[in-house]
Amino acid sequence: MKSVCIFCGSSPGLDPVHAEGARAMGREIARRGLTLVYGGGAVGLMGTVADAALAAGGEVHGVIPRALREKEIGHNGLTRLEVVDTMHIRKARMAELSDGFVAMSGGVGTFEEIFEIWTWGQLGIHRKPLGFFNIAGFYDPLAAFLDNTTQAGFMRQQHRDMAMTESDPAKLLYRMAAYEPQATIKWVEKEEV
């Protein structure tokens, strides 16, 4: 794994623990010599993780849609900032540049991004690792929901297992680097009627 994509909030959240976690993740990415790929923003946890990686000597590659860049929320101090036309192009480009994906604390945009990547993995479009950086238990309710989804038969256990969850950035990145993708088939067999 040479690069990792971070999906996270454009807000810092109310509890400073989320920004502390973002700084820890940025430092760990730089320490490992990975390139941080992210949405290119200077605000919220996005700016925090990028600044931490840069301050630790890491490379940071941002990808931002033109409309957001024009609102002056793009980060001007990155190793590289790509400006693209749409959110769809942004997500595809970030996926192309990344060897793994991490969701940190965030809102609906963060959820949408990691779930799309997870779906692509489930369908065999990519074989890259993905995980949730569970800062202060942020993703505990989601993990319970996903376990329930699996127990109810709407997700196979092998697909549930694709998403790693850790509260320590070093442990999460270690697990992701060691990830061995399994051959997966998305569809659940049809029941005979």
Image (tube, rainbow, N blue to C red):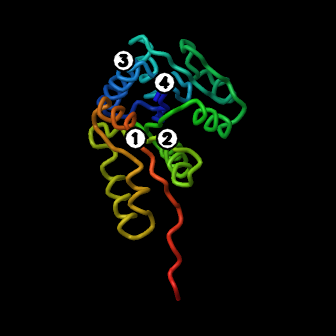
Q: Residue at x 44, y 63 (%)?
A: 155
Give the alpha-carbon distance from disc 3 to disc 2, as whole Å. Answer: 21 Å
Left or right position of 101 against 140: right
Image: 184 above or below 3? below
Give the x, y percent position of residue 170: 30, 29
Residue marked by disc 3: 31
Q: Which of the two residues, 175 or 60, is positioned nearer the viewer here?
A: 175
Q: Are marks 1 and 2 in contact (CB under 8 Å)?
A: yes
Residue 113 percent coordinates (x, y): 53, 43
Q: Nearer the viewer, mark 4 or mark 2?
A: 2
Q: Are marks 4 and 2 in contact (CB under 8 Å)?
A: no
Mark closest to the chain's N terminus, 4 or 3: 3
Disc 1 vs disc 3: which is toward the camera?
1
Q: Nearer the viewer, residue 187 or 21?
A: 187
Three-letter code, disc 1 = Tyr
Residue at 59% x, 16% y is 80
Secondary structure state at the residue bearing disc 3: helix
Q: Which mark is residue 36?
A: 4
> Which is in the foreground here, disc 3 or disc 2?
2
The disc at residue 179 is: 1
Q: Earlier in the sequence, mark 1 or mark 3?
A: 3
Coordinates of residue 53 in the picture (x, y in percent): 42, 18
Marked residue nearer the N-terminal end (4 or 1): 4
> Marks 4 and 3, how far apart in space?
11 Å
Q: Write down the residue under mark 2.
A: 128
Amino acid type shown at disc 4: Leu
